[in-house]
Structure formats: structure tokens, C-alpha cells
Image (cartoon, grey):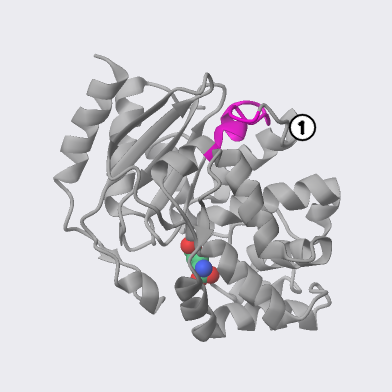
Amino acid sequence: MSINELLESIYQQAALQLGRGEVAQYIPALAEVDANQFGITICDIQGNVHSVGDAQTPFSIQSISKVYSLTLAMQNLGNKVWQRVGMEPSGLPFNSLIQLEQEQGLPRNPFINAGALVVADMIESSYATPSLAIKNFVRTLAANPEIQIDSKVAQSEYDHRARNAAAAYLMKSFGNFNNEVEDVLMNYFSTCAIKMSCVDLAKSFSYLANKGQCVFSNKRILPEQQARQINALMATSGLYDEAGKFAFEVGFPGKSGVGGGIIAIVPGVLSICVWSPALNKTGNSYVGIEALKLLSSHIDWSVY
Ligand code: GLU
């Protein structure tokens, strides 16, 4: 079976689940998205790109952006990043505040919201226009100068920022936040509101499949060891409190977002993006998870 035939058959099987799950409601501008969209793109480290379904439709990348921000922070600060954020799974919902108080404002990992906000604070200190720096970075990675920030989604998130603001102010009270909270929040939301398609996302993550080097620009994005560290964090903390189940059932490092996208990496082989906006109870794309389960069972690749 060719890769395109495989993708088509996975698409047909997973699409039977369309209609299950619910589009994220807590960000009003995201709640308007048509739930029945579904796309898949696979990009191998030779640069071959294969897609099926709505793979060219841009959507809100949301928490997938946390990987780009972490990558830039690691480029700028190296190991110093880990003085302000941990590397352990939290086992709690992405926006939980419970551990943050108990652990004196040191977030468990960079992929829960508190951790991503500390990373956004690091980015804020490194760039004059942080959200533009990240947008330009992803444009280069995806080899697509058309990628944009959806300012309506960013504003909608800012208008409903209470919980993220609470996390940021709590960290500030513990001395783990250097910049103005409201500025960092706006840049964090703008980064989450970047719109990319499955094709853009799968291409932009080629560096994590390719030992830290971008397949499309040939640029070294991170040293090999740091790319491996990001994959490890994605494997342990990339899918909210469903990371263990995802490792068990799918077996790839992955990162999801409440826009319904999931990026997954088969190190040394390829990057995959699946997207369908309706989410399961843990906030991961319902159909996207089904598609990745089918894909991993067919191709028999697992990092484990
Ligand atoms: N911008 C979202 C938030 O902070 C990201 C959530 C996500 O995709 O997990 O609530």
C-alpha cells in the first residue's frame, strides 16, 4: 500500500467518528469553528509531504505554539530555562493552579499553561516584539511567509484571561515572572492564535524529527540533544493529562492544542499533523487521536 493509500484509508476510518466530541467553548472565537473538518499531513525527513482531507485549511494552533516558544527560549537561554520551569508531567488539567501554589510558583513543565507563561515571560525579555518573533520563526520553519496571527481569537482569549492571569500573577508573587503580566498575556495569546494548516505544522516540526535541523531551510534550529529533550517532554507532557494514555496507545511524542490540532513526531523518520476541531473530555482532538492510533498501528513505528 502506498503512503497516500494508507492515509486515505486511515482518513476514511477515523472520519466515521466525526460528530463526537465538542469544540472548545471557553474561547468564544474558537467555539464558532465548524466541527466537521478533518485533515492529516505527514512530512518525512527527506521533505516529502503527503496530505488528505482539510490539510490546507489554517486553524488556531493554540497550545502547539508552546513548543515553538520553548524552542526559542532554549535557543536564547540554553539550560537556564530549567531554573524557572520543571520537566515533570503534572497529571492535572492544563490550566490547573493547585500545584503552582504548593510548589512555590515553579510550574511542572513548559506545556501546562503556567509553564508556557513563564516561557512567554522569557521570550518577552529577549525580543522587542515577541509575538512577531515567533510568527517569523514559524514562517521560516514552515517555509510559508503567509502564516498569520488571528487577532480576533487573540483578543477573545485576552477578554477571557482570568485563569491564565491568575497563574501569571501567582508566579509573580513567588518571584518567577519578570515582565508586566498583561503584556506577556497578550503576547502569549497572540502566539496561541497563530493560524496554520496541517501542511504548515507538519513541515514546521521537521526539525524535531530530524535531530534539530529544519528539513526545509536546512538551518540547525537546536543541537541534537535539545531536540531530543523536547521530544521527551512532548512524550511525557504533550497531551495534557492524557499523555500516558497517548504514549500507551500511540507511542509517539506529541503536542495538542484546543484548536483540535495534534502534532506527533517519529524521531528520525517523520512529523505528522492531524486536525479536527471537536475535542474529547481531556481537551484533545477526538478524531485526531483516532487517526494517530490507526496510523501507529498500521506503520508499526513507536519510540518504545
Ligand atoms: N490559549 C489557550 C489557553 O491558554 C491554550 C490552551 C491549549 O491549547 O491547551 O487557554
86 or 284: nearer the eye? 284
Residue 93 visible in the current orientation = no
What span is colored magenta in the figure? 204-217
Can residue 199 be seen here?
yes
Q: Determine which quarter of the picture holds residue 166.
A: bottom right
Please state, as top left, top right, bottom left or bottom right, where the N terminus lies in the image: top left
User: Does 275 lie within the magenta span?
Assistant: no
Q: Decide which of 9, 245 is in the foreground and name it.
A: 9
Q: Residue at position x 75%, y 61% from top?
A: 123
Q: Label 1, secondary structure: give it.
A: loop
Tell me where residue 5 appears, x and y as whole percent: 23, 22
Horizontal relation, residue 164 to residue 254: left or right? right
Image label count: 1
User: Label 1 crowding class (10 Å Cα cut-off): few <14, some 14-19, many 20+?
Assistant: few
Q: Is residue 50 above or below residue 198?
A: above
Q: Residue furthest front?
A: 146
Is residue 57 rendered to the left or right of residue 242? left
Which residue occupies 68% across, 35% down?
227
User: Who is closer to the viewer here, 82 or 92?
Assistant: 82
On screen, residue 239 above or below 49: below
- Picture coordinates of residue 148 (x, y %)? 52, 58
- On screen, residue 31 above or below 7: below
Q: Look at 47% across and 49% down and name the residue there.
A: 243
Q: Which residue is mark 1?
A: 223
Closest to the observer, 10 or 61? 61
Q: Amino acid at mark 1?
A: Pro
Q: Position of residue 16 (x, y in %)?
A: 14, 45
Residue found at the very far top of the displayed protein: 1
Magenta region, main secondary structure: loop
At horizontal 33% and vertical 39% (from top left) the residue drawn is 40
